[in-house]
Image (cartoon, rainbow, N blue to C red):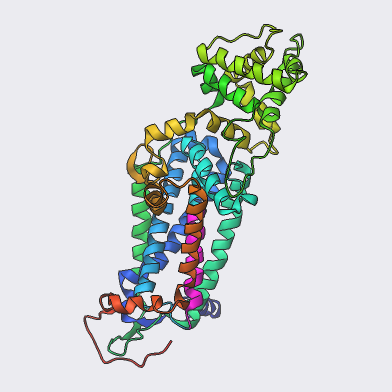
Amino acid sequence: MVKKEDAGVVQVVKNIWLEDVPSYANKFFYSLGFFSMICLVLLIITGIILVFFGPNWWLTTRAGLLIRSIHLWSVQALVVFMILHMLIVFFTGGYRPPRQLVWILGALMLFLSLMEAEFGYVLRNDFSSQWRSLQGADFYNGSGMGIVINNLNYAQIYGIHVVVIPLLIIALLFLHYALIRLRGIAKPYKKDVSYRIVKANHTLLFFRGFVLICVIILLAVIFPSPMIEPVTIQQVATQDPSLMAITLISETDHSSDTATYMDNIDPYQFNTRKVFVEYPYKKYLAINRTAPDMMRLFLNEDKQTQNKMIKSATAYFTVHNKLTTAPDTKNPLIPVISSLVFMGQSGLYEASLQQEATTQYNPTYVLRFLSDTGVLEDKANDLTIKIGQYGMLREEKGAIPPGAWWLAPLGVMDNTILQNDPNQDRDGAEIAGIFMLLVLAFPYIPFLNDLPDKLGIYKIIWKDKKGSKSKPMSN
């Protein structure tokens, strides 16, 4: 005899699950949405573990590597299944009235998932994070979203990745499934298509989900998430002191990439001389209290004299890597720059830039300085992970595990229609934005929303081997 409480639970489950479905709904094609949800659950579980133990754990321990790898492969699977799921809906006309909102909610979840994936790369704490941070920042600045999203701010992206987007996706998923539960699975709108109403095979569905989890874990074990050591200012200062010195001079005369940044949005309007030279030098003087303030001597000179000193210092550091902190009355800028390079070699320079940032976990100044040196781009070129090299489609150590293959359209554009475009970031972002709007509005666009009928792929998806008399169509 079934207890009243148990009967209540059974009834609740029945109210959540789809019980009676068209026969084709038990096919593999119609499990794709469920697979996406399984991947989302894995991402939430592994994400919580990663947040709880922190970067040091996921970068240095075997258990951390495994969880990080499961997280990575779950992302890959999620994007694959979401795209395939939308294609099935597209080919079968599942976006037709009154299901337009179901399509829109699904498209929004896909776009948010792609953003979430890129934010995840930013948080990995390796070289990939540094490079993708800069590329993502250019994309958001080009699109105009740089006003609210600073892709170089670890703390901000961490909050968006861990809290904001997951909550949005969960809310959209709830609404998406509620509409499907209310209206049922879309039935054939073609009168010549036969279908049967059968019981949903939940056992088969959950078995497929279990196999998917096993495959993701297996892939994570065989092909773990790669990790290439990040670049530091200390490395640059130690390996090539003159490069750091010349970069500091470019910050002084406001000729660096950061100082001359141009895009739809320029969030780097801070004074590079103050941020990269004057403030760190004050830190240097605070440590070396007997050292004379050579920066004051430089700043006390007129503009013309300062420009001569900048040219002289550039020539000095271009010729050799010799550093000197000895007072130089003829050109006080040389000992200032030398002192900062010494700070860089000790690791104190990068620390001082972090102290200038609004939060402890905002490496904007550090990443912009590294970008100005050119070492990040050189390393990305060597690893062939630039978008223009189609490198974002793979991970740094090879093709497995795959990288952000969903950025392939941007790579194609960068190598074709935008190849010689001086506003490549802005125009690429605008094209991507237009495409997103077209996908969202697809159910309402005449002629275009009739394309699945002309392709005829729905015949394969809806095919019922057993066949039977057509049921009355209802949505």
x 40%, y 68%: residue: 86
In the image, 354: left or right of 240?
A: right
Q: Main secondary structure of the magenta part?
A: helix
Image mark count = 0
* Depth check, front residue: 119 or 18: 119
Image position, residue 231 (x, y; %): 50, 29
Q: Is residue 255 above or below residue 287?
A: below
x 62%, y 26%: residue: 350
x 69%, y 33%: residue: 271
Image position, residue 9 (x, y; %): 52, 75
**Residue 4 visible somewhere in the drawing:** yes
* Depth check, front residue: 265 or 32: 265
Q: Is residue 84 above or below residue 153?
A: below
Q: Does the magenta stretch include residue 83?
A: no
Residue at the outermost front position: 304
Start-end of magenta stretch: 98-115
Image position, residue 201 (x, y; %): 35, 75
Image quarter for residue 244? top right
Q: Is residue 45 above or below residue 3?
A: above
Q: Is residue 104 magenta?
A: yes
Residue at the outermost left position: 465
Q: Is residue 137 above or below residue 5?
A: above
